[in-house]
């Protein structure tokens, strides 16, 4: 079959289950139709390098990788400046389509590249496949980003084991889940495991986020569980809360951070669960409450697992969708597949702000699901519990009233 030109695939950001399913499916469907399929190692940095690191896909390789975890293409968070853009790779390899796989940063960069190529009169289509375990890309409500369900599934497996440890040992555990500025993972994992306390940044819609409020919410669950005759439990906290804290608030924790060249604390070098657990232990000691707690971080363990059945099918549909939209001459869009499996484009220009950034999708606190979980699924102190709390502890229950803390 005569070669029709080439398509290029790159993956940006961090890993998510299903990347290889997307890559393998795209490769197979385009190879079948007579295109050369080029994979780029190193993301955007490689794309605009003088000698990009590439791999040519054939059908056996695409077939071999599609069900694996991790990514066959080495990923990068590199964000090129406008001045780095050039047309060399596209012209040299007769590129007809650039497929980017990633989250909001990758999508925003893909949008910038698409505009640049258009200005250079380069007729190349650009399609983006929305990937992130954080589930924070602005797809229509109810449509997850690929990788989220598989990461959540693995997170739940670990989180249930942690809950059993808490019950067996009579301790509390503080679990921290990935999420940048959104709480989807923490919410989904905590709700699935019936954790007595879930803390996500979206909860603080009527008050500012602070360590003190976070710790008091955890203690609210500890007090309620004590009233119920339960001396153990687990609280899950989204790392996204840090996104809404001031640098002064973070430094006030007195945790021993390392700092970057600009003097900012390097949060990536320390376990978020460790921070929350240390602060909880300090407060419990101050209140003379004899309860042990242990930290558990849900982070890198859940990013490169094999995709579950949901993502195997979903990512395959997205891969087929790339070809479908390409054949329809669609460009500058995210590929989406709704619950029915119908593929539609979501144009990046309709999602970006005046700076070209894509606004993240947060947990919808007004949804029926959120209201049911927070009202009926969690365990916390309210006014009707004040008397019972005082029978166990010499403290002011108002300080740990869930709704007063959040100003709900």
Image (cartoon, grey):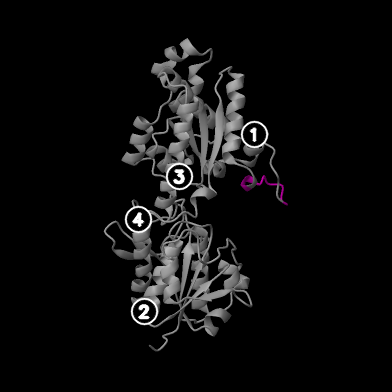
Instruction: Please name whichever residue, 203 or 196, is drawn nearer the observer in this view of the structure.
Output: 196
Magenta stretch containing residue 264, yes or no?
A: yes
Q: Earlier in the sequence, mark 2 or mark 4?
A: 2
Judge from the rendering whether residue 276 lies leftward or rightward of residue 129; answer left or right.
Answer: right
Q: Secondary structure at mark 2?
A: helix
Magenta stretch containing residue 317, yes or no?
A: no
Q: Secondary structure at mark 3?
A: helix
Whether residues under marks 1 and 2 lie with C-beta atoms below 8 angstroms apart, the answer is no
Residue carrying label 1: 253
Q: Is residue 80 visible to us here?
A: yes
Q: Which mark is residue 309?
A: 4
Q: CA distance from mark 3 to mark 2?
A: 37 Å
Q: Which mark is residue 155?
A: 3
Q: CA distance from mark 2 to mark 4?
A: 24 Å
Whether residues under marks 2 and 4 lie with C-beta atoms below 8 angstroms apart, the answer is no
Q: CA distance from mark 4 to mark 3?
A: 16 Å
Q: Compared to 397, does 55 lie above or below?
A: below
The percent position of residue 380, horizontal first and vertical second, equals 43, 25
The percent position of residue 18, horizontal first and vertical second, equals 43, 59
Callout 2: 10 Å neighbours few (<14), some, many (20+)?
few
Q: Is residue 330 visible to us here?
A: no
Instruction: Please name whichever residue, 255 or 329, is drawn nearer the observer in this view of the structure.
Output: 255
The label nearer to you, 4 versus 1, is 4
């Amino acid at each position: 079959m005569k070669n029709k030109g080439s398509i290029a695939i790159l993956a940006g950001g961090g890993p998510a289950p299903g990347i290889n399913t997307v890559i393998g499916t795209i490769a197979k469907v385009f190879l079948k139709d007579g295109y050369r399929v080029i994979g780029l190692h190193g993301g955007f940095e490689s794309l605009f390098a003088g000698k990009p690191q590439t791999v040519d896909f054939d059908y056996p390789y695409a077939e071999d990788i599609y069900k694996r975890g991790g990514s066959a293409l080495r990923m990068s968070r590199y964000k090129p400046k406008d001045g780095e853009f050039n047309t060399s790779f596209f012209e040299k390899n007769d590129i007809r389509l650039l497929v980017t796989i990633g989250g909001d940063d990758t999508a925003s960069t893909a949008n910038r590249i698409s505009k640049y190529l258009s200005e250079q009169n380069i007729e190349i289509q650009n399609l983006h496949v929305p990937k992130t375990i954080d589930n924070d890309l602005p797809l229509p409500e109810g449509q997850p980003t690929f990788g989220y369900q598989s990461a959540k599934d693995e997170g739940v497996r670990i989180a249930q084991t942690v809950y059993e440890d808490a019950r067996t040992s009579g301790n509390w555990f503080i679990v921290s889940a990935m999420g940048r500025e959104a709480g989807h993972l923490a919410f989904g994992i905590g709700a699935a495991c019936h954790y007595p306390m879930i803390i996500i940044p979206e909860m603080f819609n009527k008050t500012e986020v602070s360590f003190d409020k976070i710790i008091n919410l955890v203690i609210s669950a500890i007090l309620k569980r004590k009233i119920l005759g339960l001396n153990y439990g687990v609280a899950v906290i989204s790392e996204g809360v840090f996104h809404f804290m001031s640098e002064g608030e973070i430094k006030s924790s007195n945790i021993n951070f390392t700092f970057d060249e600009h003097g900012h604390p390097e949060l990536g070098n320390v376990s978020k669960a460790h921070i929350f657990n240390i602060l909880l232990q300090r407060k419990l000691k101050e209140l003379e409450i004899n309860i042990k707690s242990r930290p558990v971080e849900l982070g890198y363990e859940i990013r490169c697992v094999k995709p579950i059945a949901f993502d195997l099918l979903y990512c395959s549909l997205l891969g087929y969708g790339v070809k479908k939209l390409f054949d329809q001459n669609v460009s500058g869009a995210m590929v989406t597949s709704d619950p029915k499996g119908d593929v539609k484009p979501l144009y990046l220009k309709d999602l970006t702000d005046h700076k070209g950034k894509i606004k993240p999708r947060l947990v919808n606190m007004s949804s029926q699901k959120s209201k049911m979980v927070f009202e009926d699924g969690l365990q916390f102190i309210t006014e009707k519990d004040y008397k019972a709390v005082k029978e166990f502890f010499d403290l002011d229950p108002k300080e740990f009233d869930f709704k007063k803390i959040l100003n709900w």
